[in-house]
Amino acid sequence: MSPPSIELAPTSSSVHLPSHSQQPPTSSALAMRPQFPSKHSLSDDHYAEPPQTFSLPPTDTGKDAWMYLAAAFVVEMLVWGFPFAYGLFQEYYSTHEPFKGESNLAVIGTCAMGLMYLSGPLVFGLLQAFPGTKRPALFVGLVIMCLSLGLSSLSQTVTQLIATQGVLYAIGGSLVYHPTLLFMDEWFVKRKGLAFGVMWVRPIANLPVPPKQAGTGLGGVGIPLLLQHLLLTRGFRATLRIWSLALFLSTGPLLYFLKPRVPLSQTTHIRRFDLSFLISRPFLLLQAGNILEALGFFIPSIYLPTYARQVLGVSGSVAALTVILFNVASVVGCVVVGVLTDWGWHITTILLFSSVGTTVSVFALWGMARSLPVLLAFCVLYGLFAGGFSSTYPGVMMAVQRKLERDEAEGTRRGRGGKVDIGMGIAFLGAGRGIGNVVCGPISDLLLGKGLGGGVGLYGSGYGGLVVFTGVSKTEETGPVNAATCLFLPSFSNDRTTPISVLSFVHLFLPPIP
């Protein structure tokens, strides 16, 4: 008898069968071959194909990665572009029937934006626990968004607008937005900051809005112009219906490219999350600064067009220019923040530059904007410094992760296994921003009309209270950032990653710690 032989499973998709001239395998050889169930003997649930080798698309480069980023850029622009341009609708509603003179109009925009952010942790958790629902959620969310716009065109009261244009749109937008974020984390690793910066240039149109991001920023250039034209020529009902159809036709084909880089496992299980980072000091301090920044961040974008028309007396098209300049500057701010994060700048350095620049622009320019050129200058500087704030989120979570890992290695913190989930961290930061988004709506309603007696510029007008509150929120944000900087101090290794803050500025002049 000949010695037994072992046949290895083929490594390619093609299987070479032995020719008739070869000797038939012996029974011993047959016994030692890998056996696969017959397709006819077992049910489909138990049938498994032989393993096949395949290669994943590369990260950070290649056609698939760039196509994903391009599709995410446009989808982000379309999904966020409408609520970011809500300021135009608010101005229209406040001056036209049947909503003229009604209160709580700002709540519509805050619901649309704020709920999308507040729902982040819940939606992220469900999508991560049930990964098979990520792609279907994109299609379901698109249908809900379009349906919400169609229903809002039938509204007769502000309450109906809040329920449709606010809450229902937020549900649909969240189902489209959050799976896109999760897939982005798979496609980009070394260029994660740049990728999120490009995607997150959202149109900070004129409403209480969330983080700035590039796809969104450009949306704030073209979308406000289109919506402004439709509102003036067709009214709000036709505008909502036209945009609903345009959103479906534009976004639907792009969902094909929004897919995961890593194929889903055939066997799924409920994933357990390590959320211990939520109660760590670095995260809590940075989250506190994030919420404080959000409290005032959305106020200028809500009232810029209204102020330009009612106080400066400019036309509707010129008023829309305030939004355009703000969004164009936000595009630059988002990309720059992403690039600086990838270059290794410490996140507290970037946050401090953003806070100081924003505070100066609010008090010195917006507070004194009694002419159109000064107001437009404010739009540019505010977009540059405040527009890219949410692009710091990936850098914030990576800095928190490195800090906690170092604490575990030094024995000062007990870990629970695994790394910090960057996606969940971004979701909770977005939720913190959503808190500021929702709260700033009622606050801005209370502050509108309350100026500072005898003040100059806007300080003495009905917008004085809004200016002061916005500026103070930016100033208070630097407190948690400074405290977080002190926590990060032991991790400095070179001058490029050294944070610059009020409490650690002197550290720049010390030699690097080895």
Image (tube, rainbow, N blue to C red):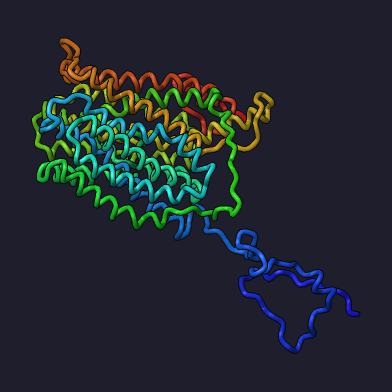
Instruction: Name the side, left or right, on which 131 lies relative to 333.
Output: right
**Where the N terminus falls, by quadrant?**
bottom right
Which residue is painted at 49% across and 40% down in the image?
Answer: 126
Q: Name the side, left or right, on which 33 lies relative to 70.
A: right
The percent position of residue 424, horizontal first and vertical second, equals 50, 36
Task: Identify the residue shown where x is 22% and y is 37%.
Answer: 323
Q: Nearer the viewer, residue 255 or 425?
A: 255
- Where is residue 132 drawn, in percent x and y? 51, 50
Rendered residue at 45%/38% (across/down): 123
Asked if residue 7 is positioned above or below residue 123 in the image, the reply reads below
The structure residue drawn at horizontal position 40% and vertical position 22%, both measured from the top left corner, is 477
- State whether residue 306 is above or below residue 479: below
Horizontal side of residue 56 vs 149, given as left or right: right
Number of numbered discs visible in the structure rendering: 0
Q: Nearer the viewer, residue 334 or 414?
A: 414
- Where residue 22 appears, as percent x and y from the top left, is 77, 86
Is 221 or 149 nearer to us in this picture? 149
* Foreground of the two, 185 or 384: 185
Residue most extreme to the bottom: 21
469 displayed left or right of 347 = left
Residue 27 showing in the rendered view: yes
Instruction: Point out residue 37 in the picture as x, y percentages from the top left corner.
Output: 69, 66
